[in-house]
Amino acid sequence: MDKVKTQLRRFRYYTKKDFLTIHNIATAAAVILGLVFTYNAITATTRNWELEQKMSDRKLESARLQIEVDTMELEQQYYNTDEYQEIMARKKQNKMLPGETMVILPDNSEKATKKYSDVDSQTSKKRSNFEEWLDFLFG
């Protein structure tokens, strides 16, 4: 038991004399303060960056909405013009100006529809890239 007490006293003595000096305590405090400062700086920077991203996103959304509002206002102005009203009257109510004659054509026959679908299928054949360029450059 005395041996353990002696070792414990030696440990306390060396701890007080070698490790718990003013120089070591000040160094440990400086390291701890530096770590706390670094942690706070990193968290503040991260928070500022996230807030900046949110603000940027909201500015973009605001600009997009402003463009949408401007577009709708222009559409509203166009719908109020005489030109648009005349076009819609001709289209929806079959109206015409004095002196004009209206020609109503029948729907396309099956033969005409097939004729044009055959032309479309012939032009949509797969051709090589080189042939496409030749056709583009030289007609």
Image (spheres, rainbow, N blue to C red):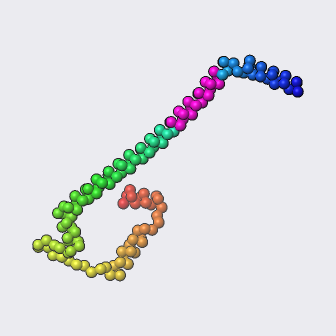
Residue sitting nearer the eye, 129 or 66: 66
Which residue appears at 36% of the width and 49% of the height? Answer: 62
Which residue appears at 46% of the width and 64% of the height? Answer: 127
- Determine whether 45 is above or below 77 in the image: above
Q: Give the left or right position of residue 42, taking residue 96 as reference.
A: right
Q: Main secondary structure of the magenta part?
A: helix
Residue 8, position in %: x, y? Answer: 81, 24
- Determine whether 123 is above or below 75 in the image: below
Q: Quadrant of the N terminus?
A: top right
Q: Give the left or right position of residue 121, taking residue 80 as reference.
A: right
Q: Give the left or right position of residue 132, taking residue 2 as reference.
A: left
- Residue pushed farthest left? 98
Which residue appears at 18% of the width and 76% of the height? Answer: 102
Q: How many numbered dots are placed on residues in this image?
A: 0
Residue sitting nearer the eye, 19 or 87: 19
Residue 24, position in %: x, y? Answer: 67, 21
Residue sitting nearer the eye, 104 or 25: 25
Corner quadrant of residue 34: top right
Residue 65, position in %: x, y? Answer: 34, 52
Q: Give the left or right position of residue 60, taking residue 7 as reference.
A: left
Which residue appears at 23% of the width and 73% of the height? Answer: 92
Residue 119, position in %: x, y? Answer: 38, 72
The magenta stretch spans which residues?
26-44
Q: Is residue 63 magenta?
A: no
Q: Is residue 28 magenta?
A: yes
